[in-house]
Amino acid sequence: MAEREKSVALSDDTDEMMDADRQAAQFERVRNAQQTEKAEDYVEMIDDLINAYGEARVTDLAQRFGVSHATVNKIVKRLQRDGLVTSRPYRSIFLTEQGSALADASRKRHQIVLNFLRAIGVSARNAELDAEGIEHYVSAETLEAFAKITSEKDG
């Protein structure tokens, strides 16, 4: 087993396998983050488009995410089902109150991760790229630590 894989499968201070329930919980957390990642990205982009242009359209989303209109329509339907957006055929897409709150929380999380990466010396370009992925997977505890480190460094 490669060293990286070995460190994941082994418990903290021993050469024994990690408890199965603990390991399953770790994988479940990642699966849950993967499920919400698209929703968070989409509501944040919808909010950005509305703020910049007064509306968010399927065409705009498809162009920004580099996906097909069909893919956007599928995701928008899911967002509607989840109560995050409202839309009618051939009309703009709007965030619900819940969708707007999710966009704000996602944007805040992104900024904290971005600030942390910049504080530890990551280039602006790479920090932006990495923050886009990390923001969805970081725990509340880790996010608080990132925010604390960057506020101490700024203060």
Image (spheres, grey):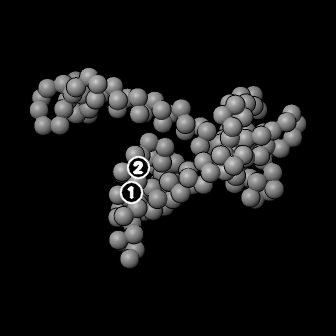
Between the C-alphas of marks 2 and 1, the distance is 6 Å
Q: Which mark is residue 19?
A: none
Question: Which residue is rendered at x = 76% and y = 54% of the image?
Answer: 50
Q: Quadrant of residue 12?
A: top left
Which residue is situated farthest in the right direction here?
A: 90
Residue kind at label 1, given as amino acid type: Glu
Mark 2–mark 1 CB contact (< 8 Å): yes
Question: Which residue is rendered at x = 59% and y = 43% of the image?
Answer: 40
Q: Which mark is residue 140?
A: 2
Image quadrant holding the C terminus, namely bottom left
Establish if 122 lies above or below 40. below
Establish if 149 lies above or below 29. below
For mark 1, what is the residue? Answer: 144
Residue 38 location, x and y as percent? 59, 37
Residue 130 location, x and y as percent? 46, 49
Question: Which residue is rendered at x = 41% and y = 49% of the image?
Answer: 140
Residue kind at label 2, given as amino acid type: Ala
Residue 42 location, x and y as percent? 65, 42
Establish if 11 lies above or below 112. above
* Residue 67 appears in view: no
Left or right: residue 67 versus residue 117 is right
* Residue 145 appears in view: yes
Question: Which residue is rendered at x = 40% and y = 46% of the image?
Answer: 139
Residue 102 location, x and y as percent? 60, 48
Image quadrant holding the N terminus, namely top left
